[in-house]
Amino acid sequence: MKQKKAGLWQRLALLLLLELVFFYLVQLIVPSCNVLVEKVDNRYVGYVNDREGYRKITFSDEGKGRVHSDLYHIDEAVEIDIPKETASASVPVTVLNLEKLHPYTYQGMYDVVIHNSIPKQVGIFLALNICLALVLLFAKKKSYTLAQFATCFYYRSKKQKPWTKKQWTLLGIILLISFVVAPGVDLPSITRMMSQFASGGDIYQIQNLREIEVHFFEFNSYPYNPVMLLLYAIPNLLSFGFAPIYLQTASLWLPAVILKVCNALMMREMVLSLEGYMLDCGMLETASKTKFWQVFLTPLVFYVAIVYIQLDALPMYLLGEGLLQLLRENGSKKNQAIGSVLAALGCFCKMQNLMMAPACLLVYFVLIWQRRGELVNAVLFLGTLVLGIANVYVINPSIGIFLSQNKQSDRIWFSVFQYVQGVYLYITLFALILLFSLAALHLKSTVSRSELLFGALLLNAAIVLLFSATILATPSVYILTFPAFVYLLLREDDALRRLLLWGFSALILADVVLMRIGDITSAVSYFGHVGFFTQLEQSMAGTEEGIKITSSLMTIAKTSMVLYTILFYGELKTLFGKKAEEAIN
């Protein structure tokens, strides 16, 4: 009886979660029109995105104005009452106080959400629920249980033991200790943008107006794709930062804890899934608690994902787990299909993550070469990827407009070698194409599924680090290398070499932890002080000595990235080379 009740509650919780995902997904597919309103010369002025740039709206003293946008198919008379934070039109209107959500960057600004797309949103919401109902009916007919569905998102070997309270407690203690270093500078903007989205606002429309079109910011608060926004915003609801509650603190403790827990759970799952897979395919003999914690605490990834709090733990998990499900031995068609969807979502959580798609396509090419039946999974992968791109650039083009104007995306063109006047070699593209081609040429038609999996993970990690070594990279992408570190450290039996492989990864963070961006002494900010390295950077800014120090730290970091690129590529060669030796013998 108790088991039946527990199962019922699990199903209800999952249903509620799915409805929540559908509700916010609909807003990303068919957004309402958002108007940025601010006070200029004692009069309220609004801005709305349009097909080319934006339109300016001047409100009368009575708060009346007309919102017209061809992009959002709207021509609506609106009356606003900013002091009361209300507005009216022929359709429902919501007013969000952006200063309460972003107290330091959006002072005196409001997001007026005109809900002009309700019929379309309701239609898509119902369509999603009809699809869900059909899936549930099909699952019931095939006797496909919730437990079987859950196996599409994790992997366990019979040789692994379930976690005890002691291990969960240790994980909690580690997360608490991680606050010894204050969370990174991106945390406020990330969490507040999520709260704005949870409140019903379209962060892409408002960011495009505030940070690109009107005020020309150099860096943007949330330059990520909708997949990452949607899947992190759901747990961030527990921070109660959304309107009308607006519960935010100066240090953002609650969102910080929530995001740390989310990232830690995905990292834990990645280690345990890959460990289980390696045990079952004979790459490991026994599971080791010591190795688990050493892998989990890999300096490069732990600092960026848990201490600094970046969100790339999500694409890391989606891509790693997706490929694992696709390539698991004796896996069901459902596991492979869902794995293909997960991998595609992982490749499109951020625009730069598309650099990992070629390795995934290479995996599908080999699978199709070996067995034509794998074509269905390849179509699922490509279909999901194309739908994601279409949503950003066709279905909801305001996202694509914003992302395409993000100045950070131009960095790939900065590293160049000039042959002659007007002819350049783009170093980043050259290096990535060379690395991918060299790796691909090691493949044989006899390659096993396990070798394909770890070969793809090693190749993607090498691509990420080489990409980062040739541009002005952001620390978040380093998290994507975690599956390769898991493979490397779990496979290494020599304790000394494992320690060196583990410890040297910290060198990649040289220009992060010893500078303002990720100052390792930033905990003093809890007491109103400024970190040592932040002070040092500020005092030496623009000086010759400061440039030398900054450049030296960057050189150490870039050298270390190339070091691990070579290391991952070498492991890939060894992995495929073993198969060739076995075939000869």
Image (spheres, rainbow, N blue to C red):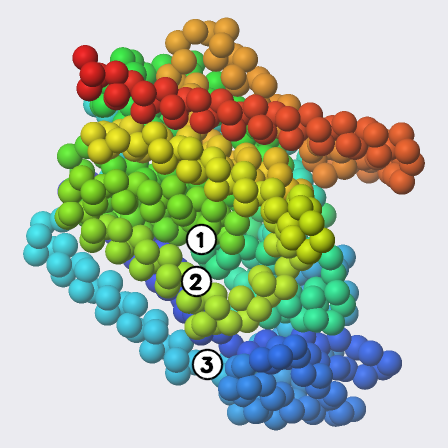
Say which amino acid is labelled 3: Ser
Would residue 200 appear left or right of 13 to someone viewing this image? right
Q: Which residue is at 43% across, 7% downward?
A: 494
Work out whether mark 3 precedes mark 1 in sequence or the reverse, and give the earlier one: 3
Say which amino acid is labelled 1: Phe
Asked if residue 180 shows in the view, the reply is no
Given residues 245 and 373, the one toward you in this image is: 373
Residue 521 position within the rendered picture, expressed as x and y whole percent measured from the top left: 75, 28
Would residue 455 appear left or right of 313 to someone viewing this image? left
Residue labelled with disc 2:
389
Given residues 354 and 270, the one toward you in this image is: 354
Q: Which residue is at 76% across, 27% downward?
A: 552
Task: Assess whether mark 1 and mark 2 are in contact (beta carbons under 8 angstroms).
Answer: yes
> Label 2 neighbourhood size at 10 Å, few (<14), some (14-19), many (20+)?
some
Residue labelled with disc 3:
117
Vertically, is 42 above or below 21?
A: below
